[in-house]
């Protein structure tokens, strides 16, 4: 029994050690989080745009804040014909980039037979430096090198499906900075064993579930907040 416990412990520790360490404090994650970490790149892109102190810069920052560009990269694909069978969430999907190199992804949702518009999530790698090679969204300096080319064939469940999409507008993001606040009501107030104590204090003070989101939007568009307490005027 002791040997079994020891063996399992060694296997678990080896598995944990396989993930790249993070940051100056050398935090060692226990799961693949490179795509989550990449939300910091959205923050950097927002700061670059805000620092321009121009109307275009603030608009670009707002769009990146709301729609992202670096985390959970997705391709919205239009197939030339409907699926011949159900496509299950997580199913491997492959295609090619503009250089005809292999691009790996997976189905973002489950789709019934006959559906001709699907969303594919690009594969995430374990090294932060090249975690994904398609970063578009609302970025003003996107990386399209590893995106699916605009037309070609996707391999799905052993069958090839011709498709088309616009690489500039159909590469979207499933994780945004805005989303952390916009989803706070469901994740920190209405969930099991909720509300979170700290979150509830701020909600009761400001009177808005997405108070953080409203702060940011008001700052980016130069308007005032409409809270129960603690309002700010960015005009």
Image (spheres, grey):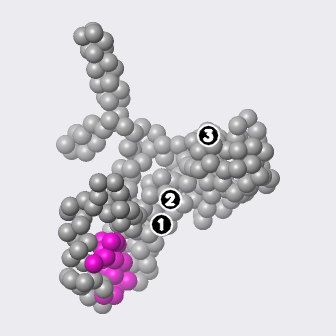
Of circles 3 and 1, which is in front? 3
In-image side of 153 versus 28 (left or right): right
Q: Is residue 194 above or below residue 235?
A: above
Calculate the distance from the C-alpha at mark 2 to the C-alpha at mark 3. 19 Å
Q: Residue at x 66, y 62 (%)?
A: 166
Q: Is residue 230 above or below residue 28?
A: below
Q: Residue at x 46, y 72 (%)?
A: 63
Q: Position of residue 79 (x, y in %)?
A: 74, 54
The residue identified by callout 2 is 173
Q: Residue 213: within the magenta?
A: yes
**Range of the magenta residues?**
207-224
Dots 1 and 2: beta carbons under 8 Å? yes
The residue identified by callout 3 is 91
Mark positioned earlier in the residue sequence (1 or 2):
1
Q: Position of residue 36 (x, y in %)?
A: 39, 50
Mark positioned earlier in the residue sequence (2 or 3):
3
Quadrant where the C terminus is found in the figure: bottom left
The residue identified by callout 1 is 67
């Amino acid at each position: 029994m002791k040997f079994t416990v020891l063996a399992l412990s060694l296997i678990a520790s080896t598995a944990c050690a396989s993930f790249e360490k993070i940051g100056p404090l050398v935090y060692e994650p226990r799961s693949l989080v490179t795509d989550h970490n990449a939300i910091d790149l959205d923050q950097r892109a927002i700061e670059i745009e805000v620092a321009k102190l121009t109307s275009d810069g603030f608009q670009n920052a707002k769009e990146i804040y709301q729609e992202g560009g670096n985390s959970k990269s997705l391709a919205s694909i239009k197939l030339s014909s409907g699926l011949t069978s159900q496509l299950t969430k997580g199913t491997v999907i492959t295609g090619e980039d503009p250089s005809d190199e292999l691009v790996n992804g997976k189905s973002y949702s489950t789709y019934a037979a006959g559906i001709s518009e699907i969303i594919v999530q690009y594969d995430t790698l374990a090294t932060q430096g090249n975690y994904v090679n398609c970063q578009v969204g609302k970025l003003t300096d996107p990386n399209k090198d590893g995106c699916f080319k605009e037309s070609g064939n996707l391999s799905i469940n052993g069958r090839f499906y011709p498709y088309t999409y616009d690489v500039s507008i159909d590469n979207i993001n499933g994780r945004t900075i805005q989303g952390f606040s916009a989803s706070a009501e469901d994740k920190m107030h209405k969930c099991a064993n909720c509300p979170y104590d700290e979150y509830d204090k701020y909600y009761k003070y400001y009177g808005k579930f997405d108070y953080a989101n409203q702060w940011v939007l008001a700052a980016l568009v130069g308007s005032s907040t409409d809270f129960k307490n603690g309002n700010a005027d960015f005009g």
